Amino acid sequence: MEGIAAYMERPVSNTESGTEETEQKEVYDVVMIGAGPAGLAAAAAAKEEGAGRVLVIDRDSAGGGILQQCIHPGFGLTYYREELTGPEYAGRFLTKAADEQAEFLLNTMVLEINPAKRTLLCSSQEHGMMQIQAKAIVLAMGCRERTRANIRIPGTRPSGIYTAGAAQRLINRQNIMPGKKAVILGSGDIGMIMARRMTLEGAEVTAVVEIMDYLAGLTRNRVQCLDDFGIPLLLSHTVTKIVGNRRIEGVWVSQVDEKREPISGTERYYPCDTLLLSVGLIPENELSRTAGVETDPVTGGPVVDQHMQTSAEGIFACGNVVHVNDLADNVSLESERAGRAAARYAAGKLCRGLRERADGQIPCIAGENIRYICPQRIAAPAGDEDVSVYFRVSRPDRDVRIIARLNGEIIASRREMRVNPGEMLSLLLPGSRIAAGELTICVMKE
Amino acid sequence: MQEKRITCIVCPRGCEITVIGEGKEIHSIQGQQCRRGEDYAGEEFICPSRILTSTVLVHNEGRKILMPVRSNRPIPREQMRPCMEEIKKAQVQGEIHRYDVLIPNICQTGADMIAAADMDWM
């Protein structure tokens, strides 16, 4: 194996000699980091907005990101008004980006972003270490799954414990069944989808265990993935202990009280050879941190304005790297906004970054029963451009009104029959009513 | 007479709908809040059908590719297992493009299993 030192000995560019100052770097108008739904939609939109050279970089050998393994249907319902599988949805965006002449650099890892120079340090087996110069950068790295370490389940440390997405990759891309008898912890969408997938492939799924007293994922997935196959859903329950030495042999499951503490005496043993974890996603922001962008402690992603520009000028972000979405369609729409704004920035047509414009920012504040709002700030003046804000509630509710207030005055509101933390909501703020001040969004009982 | 409780999945509202009927005859549908819900509940009562997705092994120029596939129309739920057996056995040769038919009329359901991805992009 060649170590990183071997790469470092090569010239740090595609020229044979030269220091960092004099080397010839490839120069692009807009560079996307990540070729998943976010990066692809942003790239196509940047091109449509008139950007010159647009590059999409990804560490995988093919574009499409996680959609490549999401072989189930349910994509495209809002964007294309038809139901597609993940690979089809990705395929359409790959075609769109390629038709728009976006360039691709695959099998390549971005190691570092220099926010001042707007350069990217990349590494690949083919090209070694290289520098890429961008006028605007779009962070589109997506998210990763929370693991056993994140939720600290007691017990032994045997094999057979996978995140739901890892199991999905094994089955759908590598043709490997992770096990024959599974328990799934967490009622997130990937967990429920894997319950169905494993059942269809001949495994037995004995239970889906959810610590909250409501479903984490979409109702349609409970119906089509669990109810269809008679897989029990245990709400207000959690795995309290993992048993087994070399391979997992079973798990102890307990009911939990309203403080999510296990209730003594409710323990039940579930024998299994596989435990899948579908316990949440974390935006993947190691690179964003090298670029020094400000992050939101609630979303775990960069703080952005309505153009999806981060606190670092010329660096934009979109998709699950910003906040975890429930629908790929929402990622595509948000990323198109980021791509267009990045193209405008590269052409010198978009105002400077958030940090330099502290005077002209409207903070978006989460009020009653709102967990977070994206964008976190609106760069003012927005002119007469309407601004869409996206947010999630903290807890489920029915018959409510969503209210947006600017300096106490209602500027937009909507009735909603049902709100759920698993389903993202949005509100369109009329541009004519956006002015300096403070925006608050809340959900009130009708 | 048979009574069936159905959670509507047409929209996020998730109405709990009760359908009473027998075989292909429906006597009453209650609990829905819209016409689409009524249609969905009726179909769910008579013959619940789903899009089936899986993977099929494709051989092309010495490369083995696990191709994602889906049915081009919903398949009755009770036909899913026999269809999965067919899909497991299937192996295809050649260059496959998106929406190529890999298994025509699977298990006489009238649905074809079609490629969901393009080999050029994999």
Image: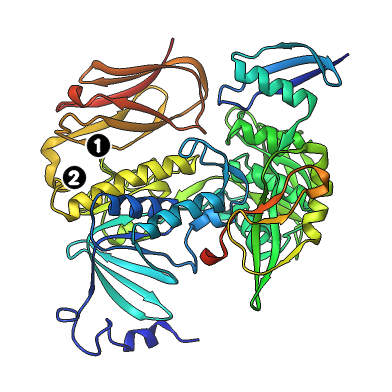
Residue A99, compared with residue A268, is above or below; it is below
Residue A209, compared with residue A61, is above or below; it is above
N-terminal-most mark, 2 or 1: 2
- Name the colouring of the figure: rainbow
Residue receiving disc 2: A354
**SS for callout 1:** strand
Which residue is at the front of the view, A80 or A60? A80
Give residue A136's position: percent from left, percent from top.
23, 57
Residue at the spot x=18%, y=51% of the render? Answer: A345
Give residue A209's position: percent from left, percent from top.
68, 39
Residue type at mark 1 is Arg
Give residue A284's position: percent from left, percent from top.
42, 55
CB atoms of marks 2 and 1 within 8 Å: yes
Residue at the spot x=20%, y=20% of the render? Answer: A407
| Labels 2 and 1 within one chain | yes
Q: In which quarter of the image is the C terminus of chain A?
A: top left
The quarter of the picture where residue A134 lies is: bottom left
Which residue is at the front of the view, A415 or B37? B37
The quarter of the picture where residue A346 lies is: bottom left
* Host chain of mark 2: A
Residue B19 visible to an observer of this rendering? yes
Residue type at mark 2 is Leu
- Tell me if mark 1 has few (under 14), some (14-19) or many (20+) residues whose alpha carbon lies within 10 angstroms of its own: many
Q: Residue A342 carries which label?
A: none
Residue receiving disc 1: A377
Residue at the spot x=32%, y=48% of the render? Answer: A302
Q: Is residue B84 left or right of residue B71?
A: right
**SS for callout 2:** loop
Which residue is at the front of the view, A71 or A212? A71
Spatial CA distance of label 2 from label 1 is 8 Å
